[in-house]
Amino acid sequence: MIIVDYLSIEEIQTLEQMHENHPCHAPRIRAHAILLSYAKFKLSMIASVYNVCRQTASTWIRAWETEGICGLLDKPRSGRPRILRGEAEADALKFVNQSPRSLKKTLADLEEALDLSLSLSTLKRMCKRAGLSWKRVRKSLKSKRNPDLFEQSQQQLANLIEQSQKKEIDLFYFDESGFTLEPCIPYAWQPLGETIKVPSSKSKRLNVLGFMNRECSFTSVVFEGSVTSAVVVASIDHFISTLQRPTTLIIDNASVHTSHEFQENIERWKKQNLTIVRIAPYSPELNVIEILWRKIKYEWMPFSAYESFQNLKESLFDILANIGKSYTIAFS
């Protein structure tokens, strides 16, 4: 009968560490099999635990007996050497970084500059080994903003969030966004060889002015006209009627928020328990309602919404009415 009948304290500790911490699955289960055998588990029971045949479990124990801990590790496997290694791979990655949107261009550049002829699949495997992935490129305004003002806004917001958590104030975020029959195209799982086609056409614009807090309490105004300072002022006046305690409203620096017409209402709103706080310029990530617009456009809006302007209105109104219910965001 094949069984492990003796293990030293050091061997037990080593096997336990290997079972808990080894980065590969196979050595972990082999180490555990040795410990189970030492604990008088029969070979058939060990095989049953890991859903392997009895012969496989037997091989693990014999490998332990002949080679010790090294017998539980995977042996190097034969295979074709990598086409790109060392400096050649580093050079290829430089070309990828120069043209990250087109690996076909990178292949052409590699062949011209380094006389390297590769397949597209080989280059993709190299990119994955290097930790690269194919994903959407994002717009960024970081180069335009003032780091000191951004840090000040972050600290100010942190203080306001703390006050709202203590129920000293209510904290809301305000912004405008527009929706038309020209969809924002998201990624989607699609059958191989097929492509989901979303209708797209020119249309009137549905403008949404939204007020949202970090608990997903949301209120909005929707209309088809242009967003002017007068419209923003009227929307805030309506919002004030819903306030239950002193409230701070976070806004960005859009022109309709910095106009003379808007500015002359700030003191009046303050007397009505609404304080306006602007985030640092070019810092949209500080206004969390931006996340809401992104969720609506890229995740929540059904493809059927873009079949007609009526569908768009109905779908948008349904989403806006159910924010905080069917549609939620978990803010950190």
Image: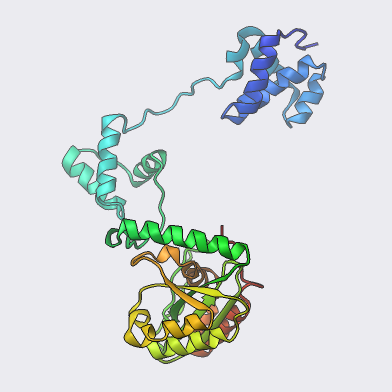
- Quadrant position of residue 115: top left
Identify the residue at image location x=56%, y=57%: 332
- Quadrant position of residue 137: bottom left
Residue 315 higher or lower than 136, as above or below: below
Residue 90 higher or lower than 159, as above or below: above
Residue 45 in sight from this viewpoint? yes
Q: Position of residue 109 (x, y in %)?
A: 21, 46
Q: How many marks?
A: 0
- Quadrant position of residue 167: bottom right
In the image, 323: left or right of 237?
Answer: right
Q: Position of residue 196 (x, y in %)?
A: 49, 70
Q: Residue furthest front?
A: 271
Q: Residue furthest left?
A: 113
Q: Quadrant of the N terminus?
A: top right
Residue 198 higher or lower than 50, as above or below: below
Residue 302 higher or lower than 206, as above or below: above
Q: Position of residue 136 (x, y in %)?
A: 40, 59
Q: Position of residue 92 (x, y in %)?
A: 27, 40
- Here the colouring is rainbow
Q: Nearer the viewer, residue 188 or 48?
A: 188
Identify the residue at image location x=40%, y=29%: 80
Identify the residue at image location x=43%, y=86%: 232
Q: Nearer the viewer, residue 247 or 304?
A: 247
Residue 192 in sight from this viewpoint? no
Q: Nearer the viewer, residue 229 or 293?
A: 229
